[in-house]
Structure formats: C-alpha cells, structure tokens
Image (cartoon, rainbow, N blue to C red):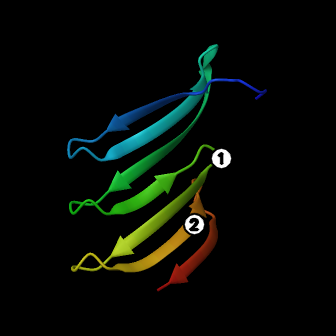
Amino acid sequence: MGSGATVGAYFTHDLSGNVASEKYCLPSNWLVYAGVKATYDYHGNVVGLTYPDGRAIYRNYDLLDRLTQSGKQLLRGASLASARL
C-alpha cells in the first residue's frame, strides 16, 4: 500500500457480543481482504484464532478460566508447535 491509502475494517460479532471475525480491505477493491476469525468458549475465553495463511492458534482453559495449554497448527492438521503451560 502506498502513502495515503485508506483501509476499511469490518467486524462481525457472535451472540455474546464477542468479535467473531475481522476483515481489512482497500475500499477500491472490496474483494481483496485479509481477515482473522476467533472462537470463544461459554465463558468468553478465546479458544481459537484462524489466520488467512492457514495458521491457527488454540488455547485451553481449566474450570477456573485459567489458561492451561496453547499452541499453533496448520488448518490441514500439521502441528507447528505446542506449549504446555
């Protein structure tokens, strides 16, 4: 993008009001965009983020909403990294 370019930002929300997806595009071409999708558990914790390049980040929480595990993986199932907290 050159100097002075304007980017449009669009958000969708789930029924709880959490941001479910973000899309960024150039107003001159709305068909070209980059976006991130988020998923939440019943307590509002982010349990997954999916990026346009196929990367996904996951998070697991215990019953007290404490983060217990997180990691990255490709959408086709190949694991890139995993870390136990």
Q: Earlier in the sequence, mark 1 or mark 2?
A: 1
In screen coordinates, is 17 left or right of 48? left
Question: What's the residue type where badge 2 is placed?
Answer: Lys
Task: Using the image, determine if residue 12 lies above or below residue 25.
Answer: below
The residue lying furthest to the front in this view is 4
Quadrant assignment, res 20: top left
Task: Using the image, determine if residue 31 lies above or below residue 38.
Answer: above
Q: Residues within 10 Å of mark 1 (few under 14, many from 20)?
A: few
Name the residue located 53 percent from the left edge and 71 percent from the top edge: 71
Task: Using the image, determine if residue 41 lies above or below residue 64.
Answer: above
User: Element under label 1?
Assistant: loop
x, y percent for residue 65 = 26, 75
The residue lying furthest to the bottom in this view is 85
Residue 72 image label: 2
- The answer to which of 21 and 79 lies nearer the viewer is 21
Q: Which residue is mark 1?
A: 53
Quadrant assignment, res 26: top right
User: Element under label 2?
Assistant: strand
